[in-house]
Image (cartoon, grey):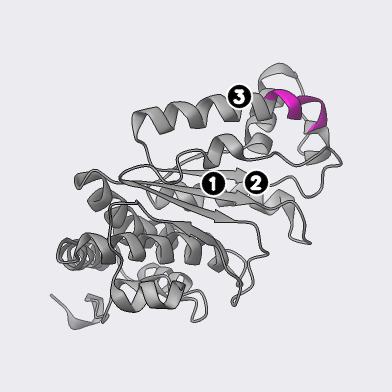
Amino acid sequence: MNADITWDFPTPAFLWDARSRSIVAGGDRLDAMSEDDFEASRLDLAARVHTMVQNLDDGWLVWTSFVMVDDIYKSFFQEFGWSRGIHAYLQATASTVIAELQRRGFVLHYVVDATEGGANLQTMVDYLPEVFMAAGLAVVGPQLTARQLMRQIETEPSEDLTAIKPYLAEGHMIADQVVVRWHQDRRSSAYLNLDFNDDSPALSLDVALSPGGQRATIVVWRQEMPALDSKACFTPPPEVRLPPEIAELLG
């Protein structure tokens, strides 16, 4: 294989690092390749990630999945673009980690409560679900569901997201029902509450966060703005022992 299409990285965490915009760099690299090289390189990347995560013990795999999913979210706000290469990059890397979690019986739930901030809601609703689906997660959220309802009911639905307001209450209810089913089915998911431009009270998120502390279940909750130095809350499976250096870091 041409050396230009192979991949070298010391640990999986480097694959999604938001500060160095690793996802965009990886996607751009794939997009610059010929069709044959694109596919060969994507397969090589997936194989390398597969080998690397298979060799992680449960503690390191759980920690890697937390770093991965939160860096994917933060990366979306760092001059992110959406392209065929980025889609393939996330499938080859992040979805490989999700598949390994599933193989070992783990499930990952990422919960975002973006109830304040100046991000573009239209862009988030249009593209953020695609990002997490490419990463191997099922995606739901009140605003996403409300827009689907509007499009199903109205003959000429508006593309202006303020038009979803009459459907938000039902959107919250349906999103709750969907995520409960995914919890029962042990399906890794991203629950996106992107309600910061709406004047209704923010969702309590109790339903989405309810699996926290359960066996073989990883819950990550992000309420802070997605700045590079921001933090998310992390609840690992109670039976999993995190690496000592990580446990010490978390206090």
Check disc 3 and report the residue beneath it: 174
Q: Secondary structure at mark 2?
A: helix
- From the top left corner, tell me how far across and down residue 229 is, in percent: 60, 77
What is the span of residues highlighted in magenta in the rendered image?
165-170
Residue beneath the point at 70% across and 39% down: 203
| Residue 15 at x, y percent in the picture | 36, 72
The numbered mark, 3 or 1, whose residue comes first in the sequence reads 1
Residue identified by numbered label 1: 129
Q: Nearer the viewer, residue 160 or 217?
A: 217
Residue 207's image quarter?
top right
Looking at the image, tell me whether mark 2 or mark 3 is earlier in sequence order. 2
Q: Answer with left or right where residue 118 lies relative to residue 75.
A: right
Q: Which residue is mark 2?
A: 125
Do residues under tags 2 and 1 come within 8 Å of each other at their CB atoms? yes
Which amino acid type is shown beneath numbered disc 2? Val
Looking at the picture, which amino acid does disc 1 mark? Pro
Q: In the drawing, what numbered circle is on residue 28?
A: none
Q: Amino acid type of disc 3?
A: Ile
Q: What is the quadrant of the N terminus in the image?
A: bottom left
Q: Nearer the viewer, residue 84 or 219?
A: 219
